Image (tube, coloured by chain):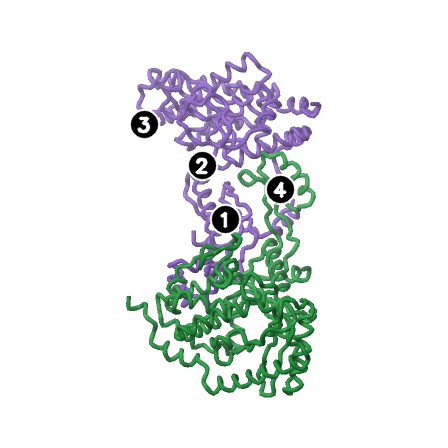
Chain colours: A purple, B green
Amino acid sequence: MSYWKYPECVDHISKKLTPESSERTKIELDAQIVRKKIEETIIELGYSRYIIEVEYQGSFAKDTWLPGGLDLDLFILFKKSVNKDLLGELCREITYRAAEKLGAKVLKKYATHPYFTLVLGDGIEIDVVPAYYVRSAEEVVTPVDRTPLHTRYVKGVLEKNAKLKDEIRMFKKLLKNLKIYGAELKTQGFSGYLAEILIIHYGSLRNLLFHASLWRPWKTCIGRWKGVPQQFPLIVVDPVDSKRNVAAAVSVRSLSKLIGFALFFRFRPEILCCTLEKDGTIEVNIERIKDIINKGDYVFVQITNFPPMPEESLAGIYNRIVKKITRIAERSGFTVFRNKVIISENILLIFHLESTHLPRYTIHEGPPIWEKNSISFILKWISESEIWPFVGEERWYIVKERKTRNFIEIVDNV
Amino acid sequence: MSYWKYPECVDHISKKLTPESSERTKIELDAQIVRKKIEETIIELGYSRYIIEVEYQGSFAKDTWLPGGLDLDLFILFKKSVNKDLLGELCREITYRAAEKLGAKVLKKYATHPYFTLVLGDGIEIDVVPAYYVRSAEEVVTPVDRTPLHTRYVKGVLEKNAKLKDEIRMFKKLLKNLKIYGAELKTQGFSGYLAEILIIHYGSLRNLLFHASLWRPWKTCIGRWKGVPQQFPLIVVDPVDSKRNVAAAVSVRSLSKLIGFALFFRFRPEILCCTLEKDGTIEVNIERIKDIINKGDYVFVQITNFPPMPEESLAGIYNRIVKKITRIAERSGFTVFRNKVIISENILLIFHLESTHLPRYTIHEGPPIWEKNSISFILKWISESEIWPFVGEERWYIVKERKTRNFIEIVDNV
């Protein structure tokens, strides 16, 4: 099966995806300094008795990060005896005190709970995250407690098989360019950890894609699931907790995109090269955009006045709003081709429609003529509709004026 | 059940539906003269050896005709030994010769086979129809041979129960005003004979309507069916031939209209009066028509150039054409509220649409992403469509330009 080889470009691309040693050295130095400062501060503040360890987690710790796309996650791992409410408070105090010494700024951020970002003088950002120190999945209290277990597991595998790092980097870059990298609501795609364990499971990107081309949404389970029987588009059992689905955030759409890519890769392996080579930025071509916007009707709704909430919460809220608008619009007779929520400084809701305006009259199907409720149907409509009810085959029909003819009215009312 | 009585108006209306004795006398006189002349002519021409009887059939013979709506059908009943091809020829000769003596005109007409209409000086028209004389349904050669059997059966019942004549007249008038009287293709409704045997079966219009309100299309059979098992919206077994469905021509729509009326009659018996009182002509109100035509889009297609065929054949052809246009239009995305064929001097096809024009772009659903044929789908559309295929949930979609945006194009191409 000659077509089933990697195309030649892959070696070349793989090299580009490995951070250069100069970049790596610089970051490792910074990371070490910050960790030391945090540890010093803990001792100074007399908090050592609460804390077991200060440790880098995530792709930096595992050496699976992509050049230019690094998140440094420094975890302060507390004893389980510390009160949950105290964790954030202690972390805040430690971070601000350490920042003073480092001459760094601190940003307060929110995910499922607040955390702090140190911004160093040279622009490098380090997230400082409080979590409990746990030895196994059974001990986990907050979701982030599990992260060190993941780091330890992946590091353990990669120490024995360092070649997998290149495969992981390629897969992450692929996911990124397919716009399905990340478990957040706006992406509903594959997390970094999920990418890692998939590569570990299949041994190579090639083998992973071969199998992914045979996946079916709702029917794929990788690993031995011991959790509650539950429906997921994709189940990938967490190696450190067989009751947890690492792919729980993956939507049918994201999964389908990967399956679709895998199918095309089998058919034309070269597609891997051009997909990996994209640098992820889109060249804005006004003419091209104008051209696209003329195909069907586009509606852009800009939200400028929204509560100061974490992006993840806003994504949840506005995804629901867009779904609701789409549902009402479709029930009213509009054809919505697709929709999208974009969250940056403002929030943008985009709807691609067959048409923003509908004809004035529509037909309304009544009950079969022989059913008792056809009497109430007629009594209702004979006064309301301008054209009399009529018999089409075996049902009553009326032609009535639409309540909503303009898509914007629906947006305004939601 | 007080609401289950006839409303009081019915007596009054029933009287109006019985031909006045002056009208009756005049017609009976004319009819007798014509029959005598035809019989004389047969003897003169030496055709007595071919012919068994000359007899009036239909509603005139049964005395179930409506004032102003009489068809006089004079049947020349031939011996079965006469060659089928000769029947029309002999009938033609007899009719023209008799017409000369009567000072009447002759019109040649077509139904399933040609027949002749005598137009008397005072405007009365008499159809002269050739048929075989048969004693039972088993002997029937051409469909009209059965008519004398029907006449004999109905006359036999009505002689014993003359009151049924009023009920039959009311039912026929009701069918007429509901526009479902007649078995021809343009109506696909209830024939006169069907109306008669339904009243005979149920004993009264009231009882018939009571039962009709419980009928269901495809699930109603009146009498013991001995024919081939077959699906009909309504089966009414012919009392003279239990293998024949007298209601074979009744469409679901016509049947539904009767059921619907029956249901409303049970709910509001007064509806019978206003329905029977309509004289069947529609006042043409230009303002009202303009108003209706503004509700949705109407398309009128006038056919001025059509072959000189019997109306029944034209109705068949143009019903099929209208159905075909509707089917193609609906497949192309148009919403056809209803349609109609009107045959008079010209042929008029009427379409009532949501809109005669569609938006330029439409969405086209592709295969699920994981299916092999999604590759060929993409290869096909990636070059043809102006917007790239996209993933919506688990399928490929493309937005493409419609081939047909104007309803008239479909009409032109059929």
Secondary structure state at the residue bearing disc 2: helix
* Quadrant containing the N terminus of chain A in the rendered view: top right
Q: Nearer the viewer, residue A250 or B236?
A: B236
Callout 4 touching callout 1 (CB < 8 Å): no
Marks 4/3 same chain: no
Whether discs 4 and 1 lie on one chain: the answer is no
Question: Which chain does the numbered disc 2 sit on?
Answer: A
Horizontal side of B97 relative to A180 (left or right) equals right
Q: Which residue is mark 2?
A: A312
- In this orientation, does residue A362 appear? no
Q: Which one is closest to the eye, mark 4 or mark 3? A: 4
Indicate left or right for B311 with B22 as reference.
right
- Residue closer to the observer: B160 or A32: B160
- Identify the chain of the residue marked 3, using the numbered disc in the image: A
Residue behind mark 1? A302
Left or right, residue A357 beside residue A367: right
In whole angstroms, how far apart are the C-alphas of marks 4 and 3? 50 Å
**In x, y percent, where is residue B144?**
58, 68
Tell me residue B277's x, y (percent). 43, 77
Is the residue B54 above or below the residue B241 in the image?
Answer: below
Q: Which residue is mark 3?
A: A85
Q: Amino acid at mark 4?
A: Pro
Badge 1 or badge 3: first in the primary sequence: 3
As drawn, A329 above or below B277: above
Tell me the crowding category of disc 3: few under 14, some 14 to 19, or many 20 or more residues within 10 angstroms, Cα based. Answer: few
Label 4 sits on residue? B389
